[in-house]
Amino acid sequence: MSAPAQTRASAFVDEQRLAGRLDAMARIGATEKGGVNRQALSADDAQAQRELVRWGEALGLKPSVDAIGNLFLRLEGTDADAAPVMSGSHLDSQPTGGKFDGVYGVLAAFEAVEAIIASGVRPRASIDIVAWMNEEGSRFAPGMMGSAVFAGARELDQVRAVTDQAGVSVAAALADVRESLHDVPERALGLRPAAFVEAHIEQGPMLEKEGLTIGVVTGIQGKRTFKVRVDGEAAHAGTSTRAERKDALLAAIAMVQALADAMHDAEDIVKFTVGRFDVKPSAPSVVASSVDFSIDLRHPDSDTLTRLGDRIAPICEAHAGVCTVQVTELSTAMSLDFPERMRAVIREAAARLDLPHRDILSTAGHDARYLRAVCPSGMIFVPSHLGLTHCEAEFTASADLAAGTRVLADVLAELAS
Ligand code: HGY
Ligand code: MN
Ligand code: MN
């Protein structure tokens, strides 16, 4: 029997307070066009984490960080032995990211906990608000490093050794961020939560198109990421003949075109993206000596994802010509479903609040992917205007953000009771 409406935590969610915190975070790493560039383990990321810790301590929450840079704020429950319920997302953004991707889930969890405190209900299990390290994977690839190491899906030292394009390692960047959070105690890796719930913007047009407020996320489509290195030979643009050239750029272009043709499906379900394409030495009068490019391949059907992903290396090799090519798979994540029990808790909370909702598959990736392997997990979506995301025009109405937070507050209160 759930609590009557007037005492439910959702009744204490404050839309303006949430909007104020989102605006404050949006100022950290703000871009000129109204978005954010707050990449993982940057000074802006550190500043956002410090701000979150400051807000948390003002609320009496206990901050901690783990060895891979995940940040936690704990509301102590009455039963210290009970596994905590966790909720959150990520503070890091894409280089020209929006003001809501990730940070909404962290601040919705924060607002939900503040509402639970205001409701006067002391949860039995502790509730941990979490900001996962490097979900986006733009500075350090692949993404979701924090949640993957937390869940034991990636090895700590292997992740700490990854470097960005300037040659800075995760370990070195982590040390800088840790320094700025030097007064925050460390917690051990390997803790297993009782449950995890992530609120997130849909990053697609469906909820808005159908006039709905809440998405009960059924699962996440599969994703495989690769990096491709094409090596040729630098040569003079005026003196070297076509016959003697080893032009890495022309070989890489042939590979990308052949891959795009192979991944093309009439139903437009396959998502094939080359987002990064770095030419060296990138000089107008020098034939390209090397090209590094990224591949992000996604599909809801795991067999199709496997079949298409396995074609990538052979296609690159077949179009290398006189150059050489090396294809490295960075991450392999098959499609997954969230447990029906978690979907039901979210669906019932939305229904109790009279919020129009539907089941929805996530075509974007989220940290909940890794938590799903270690505890019952679920996700709550709110609409994205025109589905715009991973761009500065990303927008979600304040009332929708608050509605998703109300659902989250009741779900967390129920799971932690
Ligand atoms: O790429 C993704 O799906 C996530 O938004 N980082
Ligand atoms: Mn995200
Ligand atoms: Mn994202």
Image: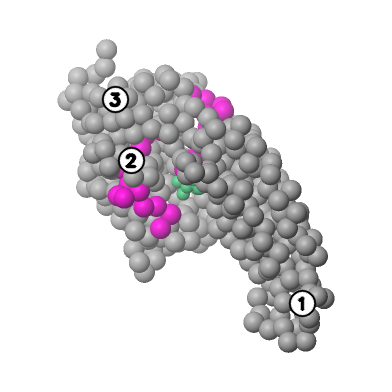
Instruction: Give the camera-side residue of 362 and 254.
Output: 254
Which residue in the protein does label 1 denote?
Answer: 242
Few, some or many residues within 10 Å of mark 2 (<14, 14–19, 20+): some
Q: Going by the image, does 220 lie left or right of 381?
A: right
Amino acid at dot 3: Ala
Residue depicted at 63% across the width and 41% down the height:
308
Please identify the residue farthest to the left as the structure is shown: 6
- How was the colour assigned to the protein in this rendering? one colour
- Give x and y (percent) for residue 128: 44, 34
Q: Give the mark count.
A: 3
Which of the 4 image quarters holds residue 374? top right
Sequence-wise, the earlier of marks 3 and 2 is: 2
Q: Could you tell me which residue is drawn at 72 percent across and 77 percent down?
A: 287
- Residue 218 visible in image: yes
Q: Residue 206 shows which numbered tag?
A: 2
Q: The C terminus appears in which quarter of the rendering?
A: top left
Q: Would you say residue 301 sits in the magenta stretch?
A: no
Q: Residue, x 30% and y 55% (percent of image)?
A: 23
Q: What kind of residue is marked 1?
A: Arg
